[in-house]
């Protein structure tokens, strides 16, 4: 397998939900994955033009799937993609040995690379974090990693010093980056072009303004609601149309706003799985099914905000699909 590098990380990286069958919340159900919906959802993303797929992050329910479900789901994704785009499969667990075991199996199934958070039972200091990823790299040489930097999920943000050290590990080619502060520029500089930092869609325009070609890719859960707004943003950035890029970004941020209860990222992180699944279902592009336990309990008023976010994105999907169709005539 020819290893991808930071230079290969470009475009729209869609992060999948893991669809659940309708009784998927029942504790006795041995395999809750809806494989038919998985194939349909992945096919729709490919048709709409995503550049890569990531599986089994937080709302991809890596923490609440059995091995049977994780491996079956990823195999279904890989088979459906059929080599059309890279697939980075989530292998995050609570320890190094289990992550290596899962990672090796996912690569054996045909994943392009791995999407990797870090153990989160206890907070990890810088040496622990770098040692963790170095151990994974030593155990899986030639396998590209996308690191998951989420301060809420992993009890702290990666420091700029950690970024500088991760840049020395050839396996680490990209980072799924949460938030957007002035530290972004420091982290970007520390990566020295060896790691592509991927911002979420609501910050991609601003990252592109700050960093230009050093911000060539975006990660997006919103792709599950429709890819057309993301394609419009990507094309505006690539063509240098700042006015359009800012307009699309403003619309995207408006659509996503109700997803965060009371404007709180901490509250969103607490209910990430059911919020995102409610948003995706309301947008109508995919049917993600219920959230798996224990993350299946949430205040109803929070769900309504997520549904509103999905409806808002659906309007953008229609707008930019129609705009693209009109331009193509």
Image (cartoon, rainbow, N blue to C red):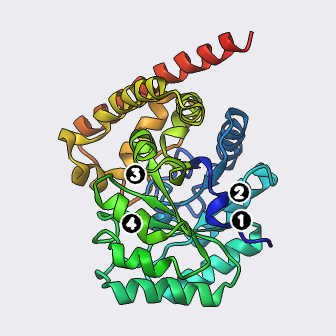
Marks 1 and 2: in contact by CB < 8 Å? yes
Comparing marks 3 and 4, which lies closer to the viewer?
4
- Quadrant in the picture for residue 9: bottom right
**Image side of residue 93 versus residue 33, left or right:** left
Question: Which numbered marker is on residue 187?
Answer: 4
Horizontal and vertical percent position of residue 162: 39, 78
According to the image, label 2 marks what residue? 86
Residue that numbered label 3 is attached to: 273
The Cα atoms of the two marked residues, 2 and 3, are separated by 24 Å
Query: Which of the two labelled residues, at mark 1 and mark 4, occupies the earlier sequence position?
Result: 1
Q: Choose between 39 and 325: the one closer to the eye.
A: 325
Q: Nearer the viewer, mark 1 or mark 4?
A: 4
Q: Nearer the viewer, residue 62 or 66?
A: 62
Mark 1 highlights which residue? 112
x 60%, y 84%: residue: 137
Q: Is residue 89 above or below residue 77?
A: below
Q: Mark 3 vs mark 4: which is more N-terminal?
A: 4
Give the left or right position of residue 100, taking residue 312 as reference. right
Q: CA distance from mark 2 to mark 4?
A: 25 Å
The first of marks 1 and 3 along the sequence is 1
Q: Is residue 69 visible?
A: no
**Residue at x-position 22% and y-position 41%:** 261
Image quarter (top left, top right, bottom left or bottom right) of the C terminus: top right
- Give the answer, above or below, for where 149 lies relative to 16: below
Tell me, yes or no, whether the two marked residues, 2 and 3, touch with CB atoms within 8 Å.
Answer: no
Q: Position of residue 131 (x, y in %)?
A: 45, 89
Where's residue 297, x and y in %?
Answer: 30, 51
Spatial CA distance of label 2 from label 1 is: 6 Å
């Amino acid at each position: 397998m020819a290893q991808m590098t930071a230079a290969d990380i470009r475009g729209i990286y869609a992060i999948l939900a893991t669809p659940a069958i309708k009784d998927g919340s029942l504790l006795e159900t041995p395999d809750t994955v809806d494989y038919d919906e998985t194939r349909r959802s992945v096919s729709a993303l490919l048709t709409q033009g995503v550049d890569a797929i990531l599986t089994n992050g937080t709302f991809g329910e890596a923490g609440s799937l059995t091995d049977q479900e994780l491996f079956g789901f990823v195999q279904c994704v890989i088979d459906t993609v059929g080599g059309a785009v890279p697939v980075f499969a989530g292998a995050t667990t609570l320890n190094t040995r289990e992550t290596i075991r899962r990672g090796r199996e996912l690569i054996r199934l045909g994943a392009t690379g791995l999407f990797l958070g870090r153990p989160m039972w206890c907070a990890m200091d810088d040496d622990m974090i770098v040692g963790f990823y170095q151990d994974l790299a030593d155990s899986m040489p030639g396998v590209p990693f996308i690191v998951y930097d989420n301060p809420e999920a992993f009890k702290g943000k990666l420091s700029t010093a950690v970024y500088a050290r991760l840049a020395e590990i050839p396996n680490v080619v990209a980072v799924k980056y949460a938030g957007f502060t002035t530290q972004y520029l420091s982290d970007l500089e520390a990566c020295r072009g060896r790691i592509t930092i991927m911002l979420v869609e609501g910050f991609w325009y601003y990252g592109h303004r700050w960093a230009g070609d050093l911000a060539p890719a975006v990660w997006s859960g919103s792709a599950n609601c429709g890819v057309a707004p993301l394609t419009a943003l990507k094309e505006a950035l690539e063509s240098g149309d700042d006015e359009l890029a800012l307009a699309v970004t403003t619309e995207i941020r408006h659509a996503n706003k109700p997803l965060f209860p009371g404007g709180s990222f901490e509250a969103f992180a607490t209910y990430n799985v059911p919020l995102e699944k409610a948003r995706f279902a309301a947008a109508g592009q995919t049917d993600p099914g219920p959230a798996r336990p224990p993350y299946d309990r949430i205040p109803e008023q929070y769900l309504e905000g997520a549904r509103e976010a999905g409806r808002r994105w659906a309007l953008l999907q229609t707008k930019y699909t129609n705009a693209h169709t009109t331009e193509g005539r």
